[in-house]
Amino acid sequence: MELAIDQLLAWSISYLWVLIRVGAMLMVAPIFGSQTLPTRVRLLIALVISVVITPMVPDIPTVDPLSVAGFVMIVQQILIGIAMGFVLNLVLAAFVVAGESIAMTMGLGFAQTVDPQNGVSVPLVSQFLTIVVTLLMVTLNVPGMIVKMLADSFTILPISPIGLTREDFRAIAWFGQQMYINAVLVALPVVTTLLMVNLAMGVITRAAPQMNIFSVGFPATLMIGFFVLFLAAPLWFPNVEQFVQQAFVLITEILR
């Protein structure tokens, strides 16, 4: 079987368009975009997913990637992939923000560790919540849902110079507001309980000024904070499940 250069070029370009969107999404998506995952592994995953998805993509345009139209299409595919991954990454970001609020209230704001998802320093409680939520997302088969969403995205929003609009970016910004609301809901039980503990410590200080409140209050705040965190843990799974569903619904809406 003989293959012409033009046929090989057209075949390679068809896989290139899919690879750009897939790679852009996996770069920022949760689990796949973790900094602990080697770059070569992420590239290999993107290549495998692109090879599997490309035969199912309808009407792949035959546009020269080095032309002006090809450059516009590349930018559009990158923006689409990053937008999809960013929306899903807000699920993890909500628990990171909640962990920061809890850590500051418990007095653990100084205990910093490196977040493997984003590569930045976050409080220890945020790191704990990130690990738990990552495991919950694996339990919910979010990686498989991400691959399915990637395959469906090429049918909902085909490869073309027309991509996301201004309203789509506004919808993503609105979902960022939902991220902060979700973070407040996660942190509210612990923060409210610790606020009552601090008020009680203030009353004790006024009643017995000679007592060293720092030697008593800090251990008490830590123990009560971890205890309330343990009691609130069963609420995380339905919270993650609902927020993940909202993220996928938003991705479908912005693609349409």
Image (spheres, rainbow, N blue to C red):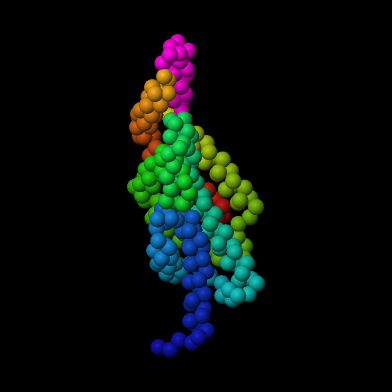
| Total numbered circles | 0
Q: Residue furthest bottom?
A: 2
Magenta span main SS: helix
> In which quadrant is the N terminus drawn?
bottom left
The x, y position of residue 223, in whole percent, is 35, 28
Between residues 74 and 4, which one lies in front from this camera angle? 74
Between residues 24 and 192, which one lies in front from this camera angle? 192
Query: Is 198 included in the stretch rendered in magenta?
Result: yes
Q: Is residue 78 visible?
A: yes
Between residues 102 and 2, which one lies in front from this camera angle? 102
Q: Residue at x 65, y 52 (%)?
A: 166
> In which quadrant is the C terminus drawn?
bottom right
Q: Residue furthest front?
A: 210
**Relative to 177, is 186 on the left or the right?**
left
Query: Is 239 included in the stretch rendered in magenta?
Result: no
The x, y position of residue 165, in whole percent, is 63, 55
The x, y position of residue 168, in whole percent, is 60, 51
Q: Is residue 91 visible?
A: no
Magenta highlight range: 191-211
Q: Residue at x 48, y 12 (%)?
A: 206
Q: Residue at x 60, y 67 (%)?
A: 73
Q: Is residue 202 above or below residue 22?
A: above
Q: Residue at x 54, y 54 (%)?
A: 83
The x, y position of residue 142, in whole percent, is 40, 51
